[in-house]
Structure formats: structure tokens, C-alpha cells
Image: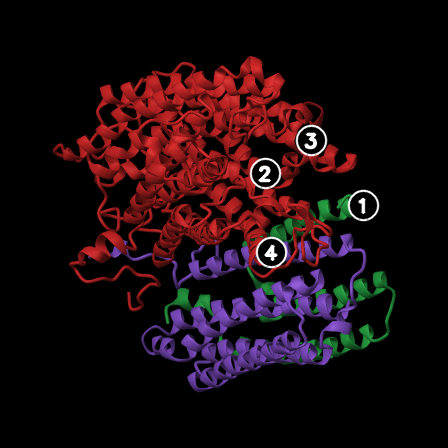
Amino acid sequence: MTEALEGATHHPEVLGWWRKYIFSVDHKVIGIQYALTGLTFLFFGFCLMMLMRWQLAFPGVALPVIGTLFGENRMPGGIMLPEFYNQLGAMHGTIMVFLGVVPLGVGGFGNYLVPLQIGAPDMAFPRLNMASYWFLFLGGVTMFVSFFVPGGSAQSGWTSYPPLAVISDGNGQTLWLVGMVFLITSSLLGSINTLTTIIQLRAKGLTFMRLPYFVWAQLVTGVLLLLAMPPLEVAGILQLMDRVAGTSFFLPTGLVVSGQVLAVSGGGSPVLYQHLFWFLAHPEVYVLLLPAMGIVSEVIANNTRRPLWGYRALVGSALFLGFMSFVVWAHHMYLTGMGTTISIFFQTTTMIISVPSVVILTALILTLHGGSIRFTTPMLFALAFVPMFGIGGLTGLPLGLTATDIPLHDTYYVIGHFHYVVAPGSIFALFAGVYYWYPKVTGRRLNEFLGKLHFWPSLLCMNGIFFPMLIQGLAGMQRRLYNGGVDYAYAQPVLHLHKLISFSAWGLAVSQIPFIVNFFWTLRKKATHEENPWHATTLEWAAPSPPPHGNFATVPEVFRGPYEYSVPGCAEDYLPQFAAVGPATADS
Amino acid sequence: MSSQQAKDHPHAADVDRHVRAYITVFVALMVLTLVTVWVSSLRLSLRLAVSVALGIATVKASLVAGVFMHLSSEKKLIVLGLALTVVFFLFCLLMPGVSDALNNRL
Amino acid sequence: MSASALIPYTVETRPDTGLNNVKIGIWLFLASEVMLFGGLFAAYILLRIGAAQWPLGASILSVPLAAANTLVLISSSVTMVMSWASLVRKDFGKFRLFMGLTVLLGLVFMGIKATEYMTKFHHGLFPRTSTFLAIYFTLTGLHAAHVLGGMVVNAYLWGPGSAMWKSEPLRFTNRVEAAGLFWHFVDLVWIFLFPVLYLL
């Protein structure tokens, strides 16, 4: 080769520590950086929630010991101030979505696995990859720092609706907006990389219909991030202008604050913000979901020793889901006074979008039928995903129709619904992924006993937290109330559930200890470097564990579909995509 | 130059034709700019003014995209992706706003 | 160091897609930019339709200055594409001339824009003064930020970046093409911005 290739990872034989571990351009190092950052913020956001749960279970009661750590302007005498509760609420949501699940699912798993699963040496743009991680890091630091400025962090919900978000005091909300710009930039750059990589760097023989479902999921996720993130950036810029430059994009004329008319030019529209926000935020929930579905599909196929049922239906569903996700956003806005025509449109699209999810869940369930199921820890988490996400999805249906949404909007029912899909839904899937691919990343397997000790209590506690919320919401208990609704007569019968939920939440925290112990303790064991411990069929298992820089010793070639398990006439119960011998199939 | 690389890039002769196109489009764009300014001085009704201005802008944009950005000879994948994006934008972002405004529900 | 560490199709095209990585990457980026400016335009439309009254652009803004800027930007688009064409014709001297002109024209654009802004501020017209001015400053401000970004890239390609012409001419040509696509897009946005803000 006379011409060097763009972004060629030419580097000296020995990289300094900084270039190797911190400012690396290797997708695996970057993937681990994303994953560790994501897990850390997941933990941090979880802690925020645990604090909130004290206030909800024991409103106005001082939190012993821990409560004294937060100072007089947050928890005087250990008793939580409403302002602090609101900060915790807003930041819990923001952190879990943008700094927890997305970095882990897309930046972590996506970055690490996509090049491996398509047989590429790295992502298409390694330096851009590194840059997108550091934007995430910057965004995370900004969000974290916002807690410590006068007035505290953002406290107008993760949705930051104006006018409240615009008029709130202090710099916390402004920092939130700046942080969001960093995080959006990170996702945008990452999606450009993912899409180019999948389109251009597939190995020889790896047609689109032979791609592992995980890669399809990342492809659609990339499209969602690419096209939906910019309008949120617009919303952020306009809100920043409102806060910092005194404009009134989102402030209507004659807005009265604390008894005085606000001295702005007016003419703004709060609903405009909601349109811009939800235009991203609805596809965003599928960004949270799709990588999870991808992971679960891989784990289920592998642990049933069967091909995924209905591969084409799965692919079509993912594509259709991605497309539809752009045209349902206003179902978050039914109560803004929209006209019936628009309302009917969004109700219809919302009902339609439930179909592909059902197809995917059905395909996963049908895959189990007749399979030789191995109840490994990743499989337990993946199996739990199915009914948990099912509950989440079903509870979404009344929210998607205006007649039933009117009493349920902004109640705990909504919180229960969306947490079912992301917590015992997506996060369980991410756990499945960690257990499943840990051997590839580290060359060691996580301990199965500790894994089960992690799984069963977690499953129990998740349901203990979120099922009662559905009940509370049906009773009419509003969300975002710092004292959990004690002042409302109709909330009285369901108030006691707060205690059940809080104890389940703290129980969930304790349930994570086996996982944390397992995660770090296993690293101290001697590595076995098994290349393919799960006897799986996809390309990442052709690489050493862990893969070296450049991933594969020889450029891989693909001969068949991704899930050739239990092929009749085959000696083993699996036939890897990359194995030369054996029958070649046209598609999977 | 390898044969693959030769396929990747237009030859010098092709570029000559392209350059003629660039100059032509340049002149067209200048003219259209002057036209659009002149039309605005006619103080047409808002509906008409918007239609004409956006119409001329669309023509200019198409020339830039088609000729300067080589979209007219670009691979289907790129053109399709872009067309999809533009359709998304036009439909998704305009629809609620226009509907709300028509119902005076802003 | 294994050959597999080198990333394929960064310069040569992949047979089944007919594209190289850089071209796909830049078009994906431009798609996201369409949504970015599209979002802002949508905000403009919503705000204008909902407003009790809306000033005629020409009554507040300077049409001659903006028209001049339009001609400047269009010219810079031509010089940009000519700089790429020069590289294809293997004329490095012409490339430097045209790219230099592009950067210069970009500077002229920014200069005129700065004059416009300064005049507004001098007359006490700020973003907070009215919704029209708010969206005007935001739209043109974001656009100007993109012009600046493009100029930085172009200046790099004209200056230190042009050293790549000697070692990897094809790769350099592709880079200039990608930068050109971005620059044309910035011109495209202005083609819509100008009539919408100034003439309607």
C-alpha cells in the first residue's frame, strides 16, 4: 500500500500511559471509559433518588447522620428543603438518562462491540470517537458542579419547562443548559461515527441481513440521535438566551412573577419549548430502549442455543420503531390545549408505535420455545427484561390515549410506567450485557453465585418500587411533590405505599453490593483469556479476550447468519459466523 | 494511481465541464439574489411575498446543493438520506406549529 | 503493527456503497445541521404566526448590507468549489489562491455582520428588545458561529494542513471536498436566512 489510510492508527510501538488509557483513540478503551463513566453516574443518580425516598417516606423528618452532611441551605437540621428535593428530582432524571443509560448503552456497549461484531479494526473516526467521550465527560462535570453553585442545581424537572426554568434563580439551570449542549454534542459526534462504521466497515461477507441484531439496534439508535438531538440543542440555546440575554422566546407577554409583571419583551411561547424538547425526548426513550433490546436478543439467542425467531420481523420492527418515534412526541403534551385534529393524529401514531415493540417481545418469547435454556446470570437479566418491559409498555397504553391520560398525566402512574421500561427494563438489559461481555473485555468470567445474589433481590425490589407507584398514580397522586402528597385528601389512602417504595429502593441499593463486589473482585483473579466462553456465534468472539489494538489477528470473513445455533448435522450446537467450515446460508 | 483510486476521482476533463457549470451557477445565483431583493421592494401581500421569496430561495438552494455539492451526481444513499431528513423536518417541525396557530392555540 | 489496525475506505471507496468514510461522515453531520437550523426556523415560524404583530424585516434591518453579504457568501462558495477542482486538476497553486480567497471572503462576511450587530447595539437594539430581534440575533448568530468554524477549518487547510498535499494528495483532496460541503451548507442556510429575516 503506497497510500496511508485516513485516521490510520499509526502510533509508536509503546504509547505513554496518558495516550494509552486516558486520551486513547482505541474504541475499546473509549468504550470502557464510557461504561465506567456511565456506571458511576448511574450510581450517583441512584444515590440522589435514595435521598428523595427518605423525604417521601418520612416527610419533614430529619435524616439521621447522612442528613447532616448537606448543610444548612439544603437540609437544615437534616430536614430536606423543598428546593433541594426539586434539585434531586431534576438531576436524578437528567443524570440517569443522559449520563447513565445512554453513555452505558450507546457509548459503552455500542462503541466497544460494534466494530468487533462487524469485524472492523476500530470505529471509522477514532479521534472523533475520543472527542465525543471527552464532551460527555465535560457535560458530566458541568452537571456535577451545578450542585455546588449558589442556589444549587437545576430544579425544574429533567424537562426544564419554561417559564419556571427560565425564571429560576442562580446559575444551576444555566449550567444544566450548558451541560446539555456538551452532552448533545457528544451524542451527535458519536452517532456520526456509529453510522459510518456500520455502513462502511463491515467485514467481507457481512451483509446487512447477517448483522447481529445488536448492531441493527445501534444503527437505528444512531439515526435517532443524529436527527432528534439538534432540536433539543435549539431548545437549549433558546432557553439560554432567555436566561442570559433577557430574550423571551418562551415567556408569554404579561407573565406575572411574584406579583410583578416580568420586564421582558414577551411574545414567547412555553409550548414552543415543549415541542422542541419532546421532539428529541421521545426518540430519546427509544435510544434508551433499543441498545437494551439488542443486548437482550444476543443473550437470549446464545442461552437458548437457537436462532432468534423472526430475524426479518425484528429488523423491520426496529426500523419501523425508529421511524415512528419521530411522529409521536406530542403525546407528552396532551394537556397543553391542543386541537382535536392534532390530538387524534398523535394518539393514532402512539397506538401504532406499540406494535413493533410487541413484535420484538413476541419474537424473543418465541425464540425460547423449544430451546435448551441456560439460566446463566446474563440470561436471568435478559429473561426478566421481557415481562418487565411488557408491564412498562402496557402501562403506557392508557397514557397514549387522551381520555385516560387526562386523569393520569403528571401522576405517579407516569413515573411507574416509564421506570418499568428503563429500570427493570433497560438497566436489567445493561446488566445482562455486563455479565455477558465481561469475559470478552477482561478475560475473566464474573462469579455466577454473586450474579444470582444480585439478580433475584434486584428483581423483587424493582417491582416493590414501581408497582405501588402505579397504584398511587391511579389514586391521583401528583408527581414532583416534595412531601409526597400529604396535603391531598385523595392521596391519603395510598400514602403508606411511600414507605414500601422507599424500603424497596434502599433494598435495591443493598442488592447491588454483590454486583460491585463481583465486578472488582473478579478483576483480581487470574485471567483465563477464554476466547468464546459462551460458545457464541457472533464476530466479537473470534477476537482474543481482551482483543488487542486492531482487534483481529487476521481480517475476519463472514460465511453465514449471526445465530446459527443447533444446526442439524453439525457436531457442535453452534456454528460461528466466522468459521470457514460448515454450510453457508444465504441469510440468517 | 491505482485503478480503484482512478475511479474515485473525476478526471481533469470532467472537472473542466464542472467548472463551466460552477461559473454558470454563480451568475444565476447572483441574478436570483438581485431578483429576490427587487421583488421584496414591490411590497406584495404576505402570502405572495413568502411564496416568491421561499420559491426563489429553494431554486438557489437546489443549485448550490446540486452543482456545488455535487448532489446531482451523488450516490443514492446520500441523496435518499438527505431527502428523508428534509421531509422529516418539513413535516414534523412545521405540523404542530401550523396546526396550533391555525387553531389559535399558541 | 498489523495491517488490520488501519481503517479501510478512509480514502478509497467501498465497492458496494460507492463512498468513502469521510463523505458519509460529512453528509451525516450535515443532516444533523439541517435539523438544527430547521428547528430554529420552525421556532421562528411558530413565534411569528403567534405574534400579534411582526415588523417588516427591512424596517429594522439593513437590506443592502445583507444583500452584499449574500453576494459575498455565494462568491466564497464558488471559490471554495474551485479550490477543490484545482486540486483534482493537480494545480496546488490555484488551490491556494482559491482557498485563500474563500477565507478572505469569509472574513468580509464576518466584518459586515459585525458592522450590522454593532449598529444595532449602538441604537439600543438588543436581543431582549423584541421577539423579532431575539430570533434575528439567534439565527444569524448561530449561522455566524458556523461561518467562523468553517473559516478556521479552511484556514487550516490553506495553511499548515496543506502539507498533506505532498504526502497524501488524494486524502487531502477529500478533506478539501468535505470542508467544501460544509461551507456550501453554510451558504445554503444563509440563502434561506436572508429572505426570511430581511425581506419578509
Residue B104: assigned label: 1
Q: Earlier in the sequence, mark 2 or mark 3?
A: 2
Colour of chain C in the rendered structure image: purple
* Nearest to the observer: residue A81 or residue A37: A81
Q: Chain of mark 3?
A: A
Dots 2, 3 in contact, CB < 8 A: no
Q: Which chain is green?
A: B
Q: Quadrant of the N terminus of chain A?
A: bottom left
Q: Position of residue B39 (x, y in %)?
A: 82, 74
Q: Nearer the viewer, mark 1 or mark 4?
A: 4
Residue A347: assigned label: 3
Q: Chain of mark 2?
A: A
Q: Position of residue C157 (x, y in %)?
A: 42, 75
Tally of marks? 4
- Measure the alpha-carbon separation of dots 2 and 1: 27 Å
State the SS at label 3: helix
Q: Position of residue A475 (x, y in %)?
A: 61, 17
- Measure the alpha-carbon separation of dots 4 and 2: 29 Å
State the SS at label 1: loop
Q: Position of residue C167 (x, y in %)?
A: 31, 75
- Measure the alpha-carbon separation of dots 1 and 4: 24 Å
Q: Nearer the viewer, mark 2 or mark 3?
A: 3
Q: Which chain is red?
A: A
Asked if both marks, 2 and 3, belong to the same chain, the answer given is yes
Packing grade of label 2 (10 A; few <14, some 14-19, many >=20) is many
Residue bearing mark 2? A325
